[in-house]
Image (tube, rainbow, N blue to C red):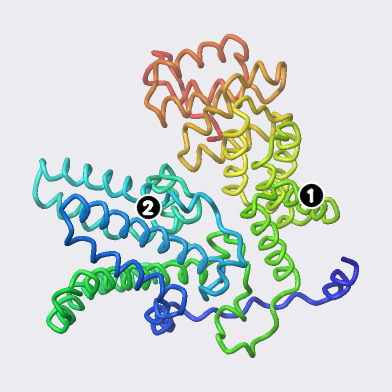
Amino acid sequence: MASHQSTTRGRAPSKPPEIPPFWHKLNAFFLFPFQSKPLVYALFLSLCALAVTVSPLIAFFTLLGILLATARYSFKVAAMASMGVMRSADYDSTASDPGWTYLPWKFLGVLVVHGLVIGFMARASEGLADLGSLVSSLLIPATLMVLIQSCSLRSALNPAELLRAMAAVGWPYLLLCVFMLLLSMGMPMAWALLVPLAPKTLIAPVLMFVVVYFSWVTASMIGYVMFQNHQKLDIDLVKEPEEAVSGTGQGRPENPVAKLARERDAEVATLIREGQVREAYDFAYDWQRVNPDSLADQRRYHRVLLLTDKKDTLVWFTQKYIQSLLKERKGQDALKAHAATLDKVPDLVLESAELTLELAHLAWKSLDHKHATALLKGFDKRYPRHPAIPQAYELISRILHQGLGRTDQALTVYRVLKERYPQHASTQEVGWLLRDHTGEAVATAPLRSA
C-alpha cells in the first residue's frame, strides 16, 4: 500500500480528458454486438427461436425467454459502458450490481404506466394522446439512465430524476432521442432486407438476431452517453476515459487509484460469485480500515456488509458511509445506501438527528415521499427534546400536504406543532403552508421557505 500511495503523492491534478460526443462513436456502437462474447450470445439466442415452430405455447415461452435475456444483457451493456467498460471481454473482471437483473421488469412497469396515462389522455382528445406519446418517447432515454443508476422503478417515474438526467446530458439529449428513433426504424428495414434472403427454416432466427442486434446497439449508445456525462450524473468509473475512449491501447495509463479500485471490486465480486462471502468481507474490511477516507473502499465494504448477518456493524458503518457521501455531495448515493440498509434492518435508527433530517430533505426534494416519511417517522421519540424536532414536523407537514395530498393529517401535525412550539419559525411556516385550510388569518408569508 505504501508503494501505491507514493506513486500518487505530489502529483498535480490533471484536467479530465475530453470524451468524444456519442455521435462521433456511432461505428463503435454498431460494431459492439460483433465483439466475440455478445456475438456468440446473440447467435445462441437467435437459434433458440427455432423452437417457435413446435407449438404456440412453446413459442410464447421461448420468445418471452429470449426477449428477457436480451433485455437483461442490454441493461448490463449500458450499465458497464456507463462506468467506462466498453469491451465485453472486461465484464468478468468488473463487479456487477444484482439489481440489474430486475431492470427489464421495472422498465416494463414504466411502459405500463406511460400507456395508462396516454390512454387516459386519449379519452379527452386524440391530440392529447399524440402529445402523451411524444412525451413518453422523449422520456425513454432518461428513464433508462435513471433505471441503470438507481435500479428503482419509483425513481424511473420521478419527474425530478428524469429532468436531472436530461439536464446532465444537455441539448445533445434531443439528438440522442433522434438516433434512438432512427434505430427503432432501422429494425423493420433490416427485417425487410434479410427475410427474402434467408432460408425459410431460418427466418425466425434471422428476425430474432435483428432484434438482439439493435437492442444491444441502443444499449451501447445509452451507456456511452452516460459515460460521457459521468461527472454530472455522479457515476464512478472503473475505467478511466483515456483507456475507454482511445481504443488503441496507446493512451495515457489508467489512473492508479481507479485501477486499484477496479481490481479490488473484481476480486471481491469473484469471491462472492464463488460463495466465499467471508473472504470477501475480510478483504473489504481491511481495505476500508487502511484507507478510511476512500469512498470506493467504503462503498465496497458497505455492499459486502449487506450480504452478511452483521447487522450492528452494518448500522454503524452505514452512518459513517452516509456522512462521507454527503461530504462529497453525493446525496443520491447516500439515499441509496440508507435505503439498502433499511431493507436489511427495518428498525434502522440513525444516531444523528441532523443526519436523519438532511436525508429526509434529500428524499423530499427527490419526490421520494415514502423514503422521506420512513426517515421522519417517530422523529420526536427517537430524538427527544432535540432542537430539530420543529423542522422535522415542518417537513412532515409539507410531505403530507404537498406530496401525498393528506391535508387532514398535515393539519393534525400543525396542531401539535402549534401547541408545543407556538413561536417557532417552523410553526409559522406550516401555518402559512396550510393557511387555506386552518381558517387562521396569516398577514404575510414567512421570510424563509423550506
Q: Nearer the viewer, residue 409 or 60?
A: 60
Q: Mark 1 points at which residue?
A: 282
Q: Distance between the residues labelled 2 and 1?
A: 34 Å
Q: Residue 215 carries which label?
A: none
Q: Which of 373 and 52 is in front in this view?
A: 52
Q: Residue 104 carries which label?
A: 2
At 72% from the left and 55% from the top, the residue drawn is 295
Task: Tell which tag, 2 or 1, sits nearer the viewer.
Answer: 1
Q: Percent x, y for residue 26?
A: 39, 81
At 47% from the left and 74% from the top, the residue drawn is 37
| Contact flag, marks 2 and 1 (Cβ < 8 Å) | no
Residue 180 drawn above or below residue 376: below
Looking at the image, the residue that sits furthest to the front is 54
Q: Percent x, y for residue 193?
A: 16, 82
At 55% from the left and 85% from the top, the residue drawn is 247
211 with respect to 20 (left or right): left
Looking at the image, the residue that sits furthest to the right is 2
- Quadrant containing the N terminus is bottom right
Q: Percent x, y for residue 57?
A: 19, 49
Q: What residue type is labelled 2?
A: Pro
- Quadrant containing the C terminus is top right
Q: Nearer the viewer, residue 371 or 303?
A: 303
Mark 2, other Cα within 10 Å: few <14 / some 14–19 / many ≥20: many
**Residue 54 placement: quadrant:** bottom left
At 69% from the left and 35% from the top, the residue drawn is 309
441 with respect to 348 (left or right): left
339 with respect to 212 (left or right): right
Q: Percent x, y for residue 332?
A: 57, 48
**Residue 388 placement: quadrant:** top right
SS type, badge 2: helix
